Image (cartoon, rainbow, N blue to C red):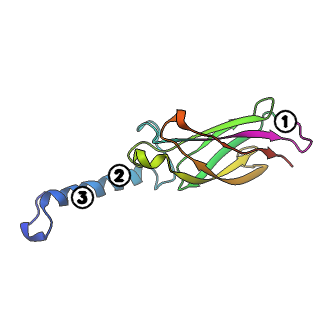
Amino acid sequence: MTFPADSGYPAEMTQRLLLRLFAAGWLAIVCGCGTDIVDNWGPPAGFGALQGTIRQASTLPAAGTRVGVARCSPPLGFGEDISDGQGRYRVDVSLPPIGLFPPEAVDSLRLYCTVFVGPRGDPILTDTITLAFAFTREAVVPRVRDFTLP
């Protein structure tokens, strides 16, 4: 593709701009306009975690209760876990692959997420949290949130 010399932009710069626009359009199509993450298209850009304990109203541990983190704003991460015999859980969340976020920005990234406690599609509790992310899984400091079921 060639561009006239008098267009005001060097041809190389215009071609790079067109390539970036094409790549952004392709990414939007592959990602389903930002609502889905395609599996196996690169390593995660960052990691986050939520952990805590779930108890019944009687203060006994709520073993076997599902906890999920979803609907981060923008929708970037999802994870879930089932509480153990002591009601403890840990949900690990990852960001889309490298390239959408520069590595230096991930360590300061905070996203608002919704936590669902209980069966999929019919949670007993929901809560909104701010989840911090880190560039490596080892650097994650989990957000702690305990829940008491009604």
Q: Earlier along the polypeptide chain: callout 3 or callout 2? A: 3
From the viewer's side, name the closer residue of 136 and 44: 136
Q: Which mark is residue 24?
A: none
Q: Foreground mark, 3 or 1?
A: 1
Direction from residue 85 to residue 132 in the image, left or right: left
Q: Is residue 145 left or right of residue 5?
A: right
Label 2 residue SS:
helix
- On whether residue 57 falls in the magenta region, the answer is yes
The boundaries of the magenta stretch are 49-61
Q: Amino acid at mark 2?
A: Trp
Q: Is residue 49 above or below residue 31?
A: above
Q: CA distance from mark 3 to mark 2?
A: 12 Å
- Which SS class for mark 3? helix
**Of callouts 3 and 1, which one flags the residue occurring earlier in the amino acid sequence?**
3
CB atoms of marks 2 and 1 within 8 Å: no
Task: Quadrant for residue 61, please give it.
Answer: top right
The quarter of the image holding the N terminus is bottom left
Mark 1, residues whose alpha carbon is within 10 Å: few (<14), some, or many (≥20)? many
What separation in Å lies between label 2 and label 1 (alpha carbons)?
47 Å
> What amino acid type should be assigned to the residue bearing mark 1?
Pro
> Could you tell me residue 33's position as x and y percent?
46, 56
The residue where tag 1 is placed is: 61
User: Which label lies toward us, 3 or 2?
Assistant: 3
Looking at the rendered structure, the kind of residue marked 3 is: Leu
At a point 83% along the width and 37% down the height, the residue shown is 62
Question: Which residue is at a point 81% across and 33% down the rendered structure image?
Answer: 63
Q: Residue at x 40, y 53 (%)?
A: 29
Q: Which mark is residue 26?
A: 2
> In front: 92, or 41?
92
Question: Is 137 or 29 nearer to us in this picture?
Answer: 137
Which numbered tag is attached to residue 18? Answer: 3
